[in-house]
Amino acid sequence: MFVRGITLKHYRNYGELSLAFDPNLNVFLGANAQGKTNIIEAVYYASLGRSHRTHQDNDLIQWEAPAASLRLAYERLGVENTLEIAFVRGKRRKITQNGQTIRPKELVGGLNTVFFSPEDLFLIKGAPAGRRHFLDAEISQASPSYYHELLQYNHIVQQRNGLLKRIRERRAPASMLDIWDAQLAASAAKLVAKRLEAVRKLHMLANLMQRRISGNQENLSVTYEIHGAAEADVTNNLVSWYNKELAEKRELDILRGVTSRGPHRDDLKLSVNDVDLRAFGSQGQQRTGVLSLKLAELEFLRSETGEYPVLLLDDVMSELDADRRRLLMDFIRKERIQTMITATDAAYFPQGLGGAWFAVQAGRVSRYGKGWHGAADTAARP
């Protein structure tokens, strides 16, 4: 799987930009706030239908422009595809796949990506929501049916929470929760079953990566924690367990106006040599753990889809020490994973990497003629 090229029009700080990508390595060099991240953000958007930086599509449209678009050509399992997304201020986006209009939820699973940014280094010690998002994004790309179920589940939770507030305000009877509880239990069970399956694979892969990075000194354990449950509580029937918990927590849920049980409250636990990485791991161990998770995510998606996803690295090299940078680049080169990297300094990279190197300055992109030692002499234009 790799992206052949991308065309942006009035996207972020690019009036017009057209780039052809190398099937292996693509490095974007430049100072901060020049537009490097905007390029890989567009690739990420084409993968999951959302930006990692904003929830508002209007933010993607160039200042004072009425509309924007991104067009991307990629190859999956030997088949060429084209994707175009059009943004118009105040209107819904339009997504076209190979000339046919598709719904946003049909986008996920077409082009697979793994995104790694400095914020991900806080994945382990950050809030549970970040770890849930990591897991959901990973599974959704491998299983569109999971993504559809996740959307349905979030809708059920939203509707149930609204009903809880109305009941609290005596504007609806508590008996109305029965139908929503049944739907929530069924949907939650499907999501958690898939998450448990994915985490079992992720645990194995992440531990292999951790041992490689640490010189066989550390074992990384990744486990899934169901909020409010011991493992023995849910091994037999998840649906029954959720129905029981929702009934027992009903009065408390009405009082608080929120649903207290469900996969939207679950978490991932990571341990190194049986020590909780979030609570007691050193900064170095936490960063190694995150890197192991990201490399495991690549392997997981390959095992599920048959191909490595495209790897997007946003200013990560400056946050990793020399040994971790070397290991990351060695892994990328060995497995021939198409990678797009933004960085402020070419010194983070060893010589002889090959690939395509671009200079980015104030919304203009130029390609280096002879690697990053040569002058940036080829302007990238439509």
Image: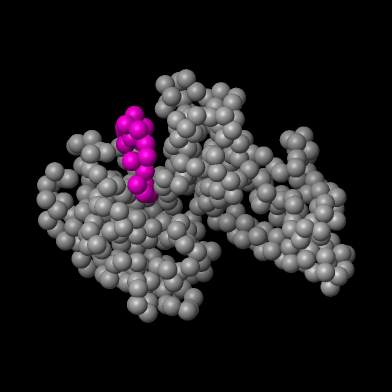
The secondary structure that dominates the magenta segment is helix
Describe the colour scheme in one phrase.
Answer: one colour
- Lateral position of residue 194 relative to residue 255, left or right: left
- Asked whether residue 363 is in view, the answer is yes
- Lateral position of residue 370 relative to residue 80, left or right: left
Q: Image height check: is 63 above or below 360? A: below
Instruction: Write the residue at 19% across / 37% down.
Output: 352
Instruction: Write the residue at 22% across / 68% down.
Output: 382
Instruction: Write the residue at 51% across / 43% down.
Output: 123
Q: Which residues are magenta?
A: 312-330
Quarter of the image holding residue 197?
top right
83 or 218, nearer to the observer: 218
Query: Residue 81: x and y, percent?
Result: 37, 61
Query: Residue 164: x and y, percent?
Result: 79, 64
Query: Residue 117: x and y, percent?
Result: 41, 47
Query: Residue 34: x and y, percent?
Result: 28, 58
- Asked whether residue 139 is in view, the answer is no
How many labels, in total?
Answer: 0
323 is within the stretch colored magenta: yes
240 is within the stretch colored magenta: no
- Lateral position of residue 222 relative to residue 305, left or right: right
Instruction: Write the residue at 18% across / 54% down.
Output: 367
